[in-house]
Image (tube, helix red, strand yellow):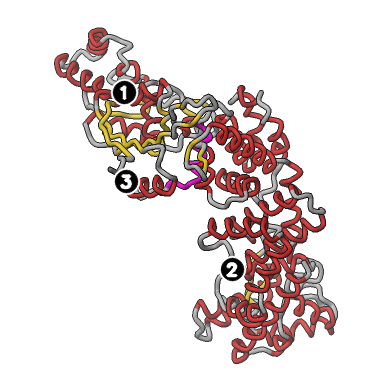
Amino acid sequence: MQTQNYSVNQQLIETVLAWVTAGEIAIPEIQRPFVWDKTKVRELMDSLYRGYPIGYLISWRNPSINLKDGSKSEGKKILIDGQQRVTAMIAAILGEKIINKDYKKERIIISFHPLKEKFEVFNYAIKNDSSWIPDISPVIKREVSLLSLIKNYCDKNPQTDQEKLEKVLQKLQGITKKQIGLIELSGELDIETVTEIFVRINSQGVVLSQADFAMSKIASNDRYGGVELRKCIDYFCHLAIYPDFYNKLTEIDKDFSQSKYMSYLRWLKNENDDLYDPNYKDVLRVAFVSEFSRGKLADLVSLLSGRNFETRTYEEDIVKNTFKRLEKSVLKFINETNFKRFLMIIRSAGFIDKSMIRSRNALNFAYILYLKLRSLNYQPAKIEKYVRKWFVLSVLTGRYSGSPESKIDFDIKRIDELGIENHMLNLERAELSDGFWGDGLIQSLNSAIASSPHFNVFLAAQVKNKDKGFLSKEITVADLITHRGDIHHIFPKDFLRKRGLQRREYNQIANYVYMQSEINVKIGNKKPKDYFNLILKQIKDKKMLYGGITNKEELLKNIKENCIPEMILKADIDDYNEFLKQRRKLIAEKIKKYYQGL
């Protein structure tokens, strides 16, 4: 007979809140910023008051684990769906403080107008209006007697119908007697099944990622420092974007500021580099894969639960060991030296701005590779070479754009099995063959998307080669990218549009170039043949009009650096398609040479 892997029950709101208060149900999100708008808390209270359904809560019990003495430890239930609703009730009904987006603790006070039976977020207008009950929490918790509440209200509002007021306030106090559905999932269920159940049950179609499950598992374990480890991950990600937050952290979270993790975050207070601002999913993935050589975060969830993959049992030693290794790897991730050296390698490949990096998974695996090779004591020069090439290969081939977990799992296992040298060589043979360079890449450049990864690799090649911007004497492509320069058209857009070309035809990668805006303005909508005649004239007359190029050799070098065929000097509308064809080939050749030189 098959075991029932879940139960569905209706529970009183007061029962659920009591379980949370007693720690029988863990709400990992309670230690993170509350993402709901305050008006949603008000709407939740209104729904409870009127008896409207507010959806199901879903809890997942940590599996019971085998202890060393042979006994079992009963697993704690973790709330995996409904955290925001329960947190809202804790705030509005129990009157407890929540953590806002600035990581500060604050109260969300919900007010109630008994004559209109209306809820509102507390404000100063309500404070000065005696017809409002400013805070529903003391009323619902029965911290004030109903008789004294009615008397005080009627004294301030003499026209009130006392009998009706009593009924309304009793209804308000009865909010905690309303029921909510609780689906309890067995701890024996694997992560894939839990994910599937979550997606099917959740009426809003929200997908809870395996990283979310992992973070919940971490935060619910207070035996091995899970709460502090999770805070460390969250605070790191927040500080990476808002370095000024460091100075507030001591005031906001005194316990954490005195923990061992605080020193690992100190360097971020002066850090403004935004090339790689990881979120908690990135931190977990990189830390887990680099340390455990497994690509699927579902395995991390299982290991955090103590799963023995061979015996299919759950053991305390595995939980302990997993937390120890994960902590070690997280600290490697957030280590200043590791983080900055990794970004230095990415920059050295020509990727100097976050706008050039569209694949977060490619960046994550490059960092995984960096940490992995460091742990294997590779020479720094070799680490730099392999990380650079792997990152560019991943971007060029879109390696992690589809089924990234499977690819990550495959790659990390092959690196362990074959070594990075052999695995990369095999990939280059399979993915970067002559067919790719001579045909596939050229076809990929037949695109109108300026954010194309292939165009970004081309720009990285220009940065690495210190190429000048189109028609610039001194200003480099790197300068233009760093200072938010603009991409312009070699064949002016307006020129092509007036001759009947459609958007996808004139907005072509092969027609894009980084150019100083003032040069672009001077070119206007002139055909290439005309504006190059003027440039040749300025070279002859030494009267600068387009940039600062003063001789033809400089001009030819400039167009070569930008992979522009020399036919551009005399090009008219009839030459446009041939120009695109030749430039795509030149760009592909430059990318190939760049990759092979990494």
Residue 44, position as x, y percentages in the image: 31, 33
The secondary element bearing badge 1 is classed as: helix
Q: In the rendered structure, which segment of residues is drawn in magenta?
A: 208-220
Tell me the residue at 56%/75% (across/down).
447
Q: Which residue is mark 2?
A: 452
The answer to whether residue 111 is seen in the rendering is yes
The residues tagged by marks 2 and 1 sit, at their Cα atoms, a distance apart of: 54 Å
Q: Which residue is mark 1?
A: 15
Nearer-the-camera pick, 141 or 198: 198
Residue 397, position as x, y percentages in the image: 61, 69
Q: Quadrant of residue 532?
A: bottom right
Which mark is nearer the camera, 2 or 3?
3
Asked whether, in this view, residue 246 is left or right of residue 188, the answer is right
Q: Earlier in the sequence, mark 2 or mark 1?
A: 1
Which mark is nearer the camera, 2 or 1?
1
The secondary element bearing badge 2 is classed as: loop
Question: Is residue 211 highlighted in magenta?
Answer: yes
Q: Which residue type does callout 3 highlight?
A: Ile
Nearer-the-camera pick, 159 or 431: 431
